[in-house]
Structure formats: structure tokens, C-alpha cells
Image: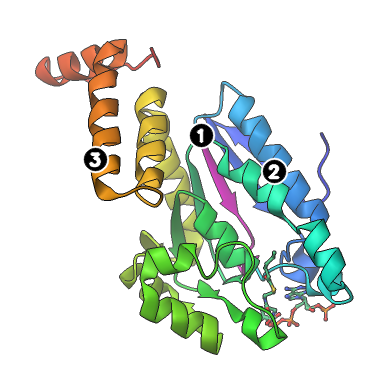
Amino acid sequence: MAYETIIVEVENHVAQITLNRPDALNALNDELMKELADALSAAQDNEKVRCIIITGSEKAFAAGADIAMMKDKSFVEAFSGDLFTPETDQIMRVRKPIIAAVSGYALGGGCELAMMCDFIICSETAKFGQPEINLGVVAGIGGTQRLTRIVGKSKAMDMNLTGRFMDANEAERSGLASRVVPCKKLLEEANAAAQKIAEKSMISVMVVKEAVNRAYEVPLREGLLFERRMFHSLFATEDQSEGMSAFLEKREAQFRDK
Ligand code: HXC
């Protein structure tokens, strides 16, 4: 499928999806969200892809949902249209890991999209925020929920109530970003992380993703049980045998996703 608002490149087992609406700082509109969800599903189905990166431009990862698109909506249109819900559901169904590589603005829906990814690597110029309050609305796809679970109540309230932006260092300190790197190195670093992941057994990788995400959904005791049972299950794989043998034989493991 030819895309108008994103660019997809697949190289060395990594699918890189670049949000590409430069005139609107990559604001998320229907078309972009549909194309993004479609590209992610395609990456999920493509056996060559073992890790996915979502990125934007140097100036903006995404400056939020497209305000021009939303401005004249009535309540009924907003409610029955259920903006971005099918697309975000589709994004959440992707079982391969997704890294958000964030430079510049990640605001509103942009910050929320980054939080839907499995982890965020950001550049020194990154600015995260939930400024919907300035528009007379509130976050709609995770800004009050995922952000609170990630950075805690105090910072989530601060960002959602005042609309202030968090810079890269604060984002890393707060656990929103896993690493901060110089702007010019952002994609190199994200790709290096993706390559590292691509070398692992895909089965373990998908189990990690499921298990960590489960920590946000279930009580600790249930999560620990799920983790332990998944640990036990992996002893049914050839990759467990290969990984442990390779360690003891002091060589690199050759995982076959079996
Ligand atoms: C539509 C946007 C946009 C947005 C920027 N643009 N953000 N268009 N929707 N969210 C457009 C501007 O209108 C402008 O177009 C061009 O991009 C450049 O933006 P400027 O404002 O001129 O740039 P700058 O002065 O550098 O300011 C950057 C900025 C600012 C701080 C990021 O653009 C800004 O505050 N944007 C809105 C951020 C926001 O409120 N996000 C939350 C949206 S609500 P022209 O044509 O004039 O050049 C949301 C809800 C999600 O995300 C829930 C969904 C269910």
C-alpha cells in the first residue's frame, strides 16, 4: 500500500515508520492513524521484521491530534466517531516490540502514541506534554491513564492540569523515556537497540512484551504467576536449549524462533 502521511522502510529486520506531515508537525489525523495502524499490522505479518521503530522529524515526533480536523465536531460526532479508537486498538495488538524514537514535540496524542510504544528513546530536544487543557478538552488516548502509571500521580496531574512540557532529562528521570541521546544520534541509537532485540529469540521477545504489559493490567500476584509460568513454558523451546548451551560453550547463541 502506498502511504501519503508516513514513510515505511524495512532494513535488517527492522521496520522504521516515519510520521510525515511536516506542515502540521506530524499532527495525527484520520489518514495518518489509519496508515500507521495498517503499516504496523503489515510489520506484524512480515516475517522479516523483528522490531519496529516509530519516529517523526527533528522538530516533532507529533504535535498531537489534528486540531483543525477536530475543531467543528459536535459531541455526537466525537462520541459516535470514537476518534482513533480502532487504530489504537490495532496498535495495541502488535506483538512485536515497538520503539518510539522521539525528537522535538511529542504533545497530546503524540505523547500518547509514544506511550503506546514499548519504550521511548528520545533526543535532547524532546518535549513531552498533555496540553489538551489549553484547548478546553482533556487527553483522549492515554494521557491521563498511561502517563499516570508511568510517571505517577503528581507529575501526571501537573502535566495534564497545567499543560506544561517535560524536557528530555525530566522525561528520563521520570521513567517516561528509557534513554536520552544527542539529536543527530537518535535514529542510530534506536536502530542499535532494535538490532539488539532482533538478535534475540522472537518467542522470548514476545513473552517479555506480554509480561511487562501485563504488569499494568493485573495485580502483582497474578502478574508474577504469569511471568513464572511463561518462564517455565520457555523450557519447551529449542531456543532455551540453544541459549543456555551457547553460554556454557562460550559462543554466541543462534536463535531460530523455535
Ligand atoms: C493541527 C498543528 C498542530 C495540531 C501544530 N500544527 N500542531 N495543526 N493540529 N495539533 C500546525 C500549526 O497550525 C502550524 O500550521 C504548523 O503546524 C507549525 O506550528 P506552529 O504553531 O507555527 O509552530 P511553533 O510556533 O514552533 O509551535 C509548536 C507547538 C504548537 C508548540 C507544537 O504548534 C502547538 O502548541 N501545537 C498544538 C499542540 C497541542 O495542543 N496538542 C494537543 C492536540 S489535542 P500553519 O499552517 O500555521 O503553518 C490532542 C488530543 C488527543 O492531541 C486525543 C485524541 C483522541
Q: Amino acid at mark 1?
A: Arg
Does the magenta stretch mainly form a helix, a strand or a loop?
A: strand
From mark 3 to mark 1, how far is it between C-alphas? 20 Å
Q: Nearer the viewer, mark 3 or mark 2?
A: 3
Q: Is residue 143 magenta?
A: no
* Secondary element at image label 2: helix
Q: Position of residue 118 (x, y in %)?
A: 45, 48
Q: Which residues are magenta?
A: 51-61
Is the CB atom of the residue marked by disc 3 within 8 angstroms of ligand 1's nearest atom?
no
Residue visible at 84% across and 77% down in the picture: 71
Q: Please tell me in which quarter of the rendered image ligand 1 is found.
A: bottom right
* Coloring basis for residues: rainbow
Label 3 and label 2: CA atoms lie apart by 31 Å
**Camera sees residue 103:** yes
Image spot of residue 124 (x, y percent)? 44, 71
Q: Residue under circle 2?
A: 37
Amino acid type at image mark 2: Ala
Residue 50 percent location from the top left of the image: 49, 30
Q: Amino acid at mark 3?
A: Leu
Q: Is mark 2 within 8 Å of ligand 1?
A: no
Q: Nearer the viewer, mark 3 or mark 1?
A: 3
Crowding near the residue tagged with mark 2, few <14, some 14–19, many ≥20 C-alpha atoms within 10 Å? many
For the C terminus, which image quadrant? top left
Q: Is residue 215 above or below residue 105?
A: above
Q: Secondary structure at mark 1?
A: loop
| Camera-nearest residue between 140 and 56 | 140
Q: Can you identify the residue that label 1 sits on?
A: 95
Residue at mark 3: 224
The structure residue drawn at horizontal position 44% and vertical position 76%, both measured from the top left corner, is: 156
62 over 20 or under it: above or below: below
